[in-house]
Amino acid sequence: MGIITLTTDFGSVDAFVGTMKGVILGLSPGVTIVDLTHEIPRHGVATASFLIRHAFPYFPKGTIHVGIVDPGVGSRRRILLARIREQFLLAPDNGLITWLYRDFGAESLISVEESRYFLPNPSATFHGRDVFAPVAAHLVAGARPERFGPNLNRAELLAISHRAERTPAGLQGRVIHLDPFGNLVTNIHVSQLPAWAARSAQAVFVNGQNIGGIQCTFSAVALGTPAAMIGSADFLEIAVNQGRADERFGPVREVTVEIR
């Protein structure tokens, strides 16, 4: 039996996630269910998109990633089933696919419409239980993707800055994710850095403040000191050694990061 991952903004207080797992296991006993996270900020489609994309390469072929951050639940918004590099994403067609699509494209896009794969009388407010969970369970059990609905030629994408902008001085980036430690993940990707230049020689400016070159570890700077480094997702991150960069540099949406 295969693997289903779950990413939602449901939190862990109510029984929403557990109920979805019950539906999946009832239809496909023995499937492995992996919780990526259920602590996505409420309606944080962009955050879910980013986190699923960066977990994605570490799962085997055939994995089904279910992403449910769905402010339009019960409306006419579509439900998307995408095949990407021999894995699947099942999610609202509200832009949640954006990071995966920008980096990898998609072999197929399907609009999930066949109600015989849903639970009877789906609730207008809990498609996670009544639509996403049973569809994922049928898919992992061997139902062919084309049975769920018609093909699509496009998906909704978020208007995000996927990579940093090049400037005459270097790179101009923005913060795309705030992690639980207060580190600011930027859209400056390691592939954008000049291969010939020593990273430590590249000056990183946060809100105009020079915080020095790119470091290898948090401990390369003194306690309470900001540092720039390439994080595990291969993006430049701004951190504070045993502190929080979001508190140091102010509202995340207003933070600018440059490499010169």
Image: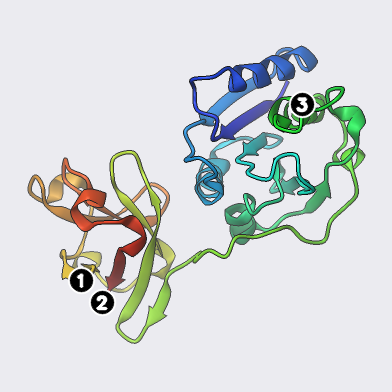
Quick check: 68 left or right of 132? Answer: left
Which sits in the foreground, 170 or 38? 38
Q: Residue 10's quadrant in the figure?
A: top right
Q: Is residue 102 above or below residue 29?
A: below
Q: Which residue is mark 1?
A: 203
Distance of mark 1 from mark 3, alpha carbons?
A: 51 Å
Residue drawn at the location 29% of the way across and 40% of the way down: 181
Residue 87's spot in the image, x, y percent? Answer: 69, 41
Mark with earlier residue (3, 2): 3
For mark 2, what is the residue? 260
For the point 91% across and 37% down, which residue is it?
A: 114
Secondary structure of the residue carrying numbered label 1: loop
Q: Label 2 is placed on what type of residue?
A: Arg
Give the percent coordinates (x, y) of residue 72: 68, 45
Residue 130's disc is: 3
- Residue pictured at 8% horizontal, 45% vertical: 223
Q: Is residue 17 above or below residue 231?
A: above
Under circle 3, the secondary element is helix
In this orientation, which residue lies closer to the viewer: 33 or 202? 33
Give the quarter of the image for residue 153.
bottom right
Mark 3–mark 2 Cα distance, whole angstroms, equals: 51 Å
**C-beta proximity under 8 Å, tags 1 and 2:** yes
With respect to residue 120, does 232 lie above or below? below
